[in-house]
Image: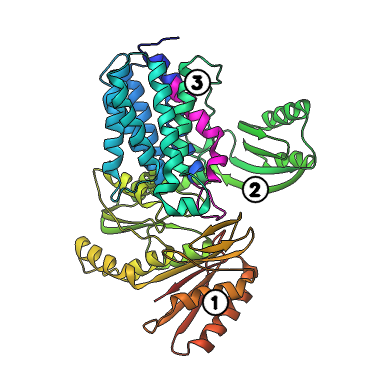
Amino acid sequence: MEITSINTESLSRMFLAGAKNLDAKKEWINELNVFPVPDGDTGTNMSMTIMSAAREVGALSNPTMKELAKAISSGSLRGARGNSGVILSQLFRGFCKVIKEYDEVDVSVLCDAFQKAVETAYKAVMKPKEGTILTVAKGAADKALDLAQETEDLVYFCDEVIKHAEYVLSQTPEMLPVLKQAGVVDSGGQGLVQVLKGAYDSLLGKEIDYSIEETPASAGTAKVSAPAEQEIKYGYCTEFIIVLTRPLSEKEEKEYKSYLESIGDSIVVVADDEVVKTHVHTNDPGLAIQKALTHGSLTKIKIDNMREEHQEKLIKDAEKAEPRKPMGFIAVSIGEGMNEIFRGLGADYLIEGGQTMNPSTEDMLAAIDHVNADHIFILPNNKNIIMAANQAAELTEDKDIIVLPTKTIPQGIVALVNYIPDYTAEENKEAMLAELDSVKTGQVTYAVRDTEIDGMQIRQNDYMGIGDKAILAVGTDLKETTMKMIDAMVDEDSAIVSIYYGADETEEHAQEIGKMIEEKYPDVEVEINCGGQPIYYFVISVE
């Protein structure tokens, strides 16, 4: 079979197939992540990024190439999450800059689009690192350049490009020792390969389900727009997961969906043999919950009052009529305790996120829209969120957005502590940046699999103390592991150790660790606060 050109309809289908293939493989890609921590990772971030674009593409009807390119570029750009998602969105952005100028794509155009994709993505990364998704993309683009003079057959061209991308991916452990140590290839590169493979399957005419389902708003927030309160037919956005006592039969699943339809709308039911994820808008969440309980136990229950949210939106819109203040702050936070600390330090808007769920560029833009200030500082508080924040800053035209590259919650706290109202935005930026290195951060969590990192043998369920640049401690005892990590962080200049505990049951451990620190380091002051953060038993800062 030989194909020499791709029209808009075919390219649209190829993109959707690539998106669905990545989405189907996201958990497998997550497992390639080097650090064995229990969080939402590369596969999840890349999937949510590309599916944001896929929903825009899926909504188009007989688009031109320019309209298709805009949907892919804009959708992925605004939906980008995490470093891998932002890089993927930049690859699409560069790719679309080329294809939008043509009615059909041939080998020459596709080759040029690959070159522009790589150029755009490399420019977006301040310090490009080889052995990553960038390297795999560059390998594919280099192969495309070699082949462009040899063939006009897109089937042969794409097959050879993907084979070379897989080869480059297989070499990533030789480029990054940490990959070799963990025995994995780069997860972002694997995600890109899966996009290419899905697109290629579509080019070959394989049977693929191209439908793209609408998903509930991220973070469980119901988005209510212009309609007045009385026009909201069902007032409660209700979400939960059923942990099944036994798998649902096809008939039972159909009956369950029918029942939800009888009490509400906006229904999404995703079932497998173990769990059923449910989303419904209803006026009586209790009825949905009672029905669900007949099939098993419930977890992750979330109920939002959409009418109340609508009122809050009206209030916020009214507040926008007030004069702008000179400076405002947006912080990414995790846990109610951390939220209270940021609010107390003057944060105007908090984005729930962090390690367990990286907020998207769209989330950042929504936050910027809520803060009525000329200069807005964004504190990402996680290294995997900085690129999305920078991307949002570039997309904002009517406000000056300053992204402080805070990589941890304690760095974000230190930045706000050092804000001086009488300073200009630029003076505050310099002052806050100067203080970021004054704090060391340690985080204690558990390992989700066996691995070896930084010369340490880690077993599944071991406790890990993770510092700013390396894993500092591993062990089977929570307090001992935490103290070992703190020992690696405290030096003769240390004055304060702050302990933020996660769940209530770790408060007692935190108090005991505090006493151990006071006995061992009598000149160091100890502060203990409830952070309420998920995943991490403790977040420790040393100043």
Front one among 505 and 216: 505
Image height of 156 relative to 244, above or below: above
Disc on the earlier residue, 2 or 3: 3
Q: Position of residue 458 (x, y in %)?
A: 58, 61
Magenta stretch contains residue 535: no
Residue at numbered disc 1: 483
Q: Nearer the viewer, mark 2 or mark 3?
A: 3
The residue sitting at 24% across, 43% down in the picture is: 397
**Kind of residue sitting beneath label 2:** Ile
Disc on the earlier residue, 3 or 1: 3
The residue sitting at 26% across, 36% down in the picture is: 119
Residue at numbered disc 3: 201
Q: Position of residue 235 (x, y in %)?
A: 58, 39
**Extent of the magenta region:** 14-41
Q: Name the mark on residue 301.
A: 2
**Kind of residue sitting beneath label 1:** Met
What SS does tag 3 mark?
A: helix
The residue sitting at 44% across, 89% down in the picture is: 523
- On the question of residue 322 being in view, the answer is yes
Marks 2 and 1 sit apart, C-alpha to C-alpha, by 35 Å
- Residue 435 as seen in the image, left or right of residue 56: left
Magenta stretch contains residue 40: yes
Where the C terminus falls, by quadrant? Answer: bottom left
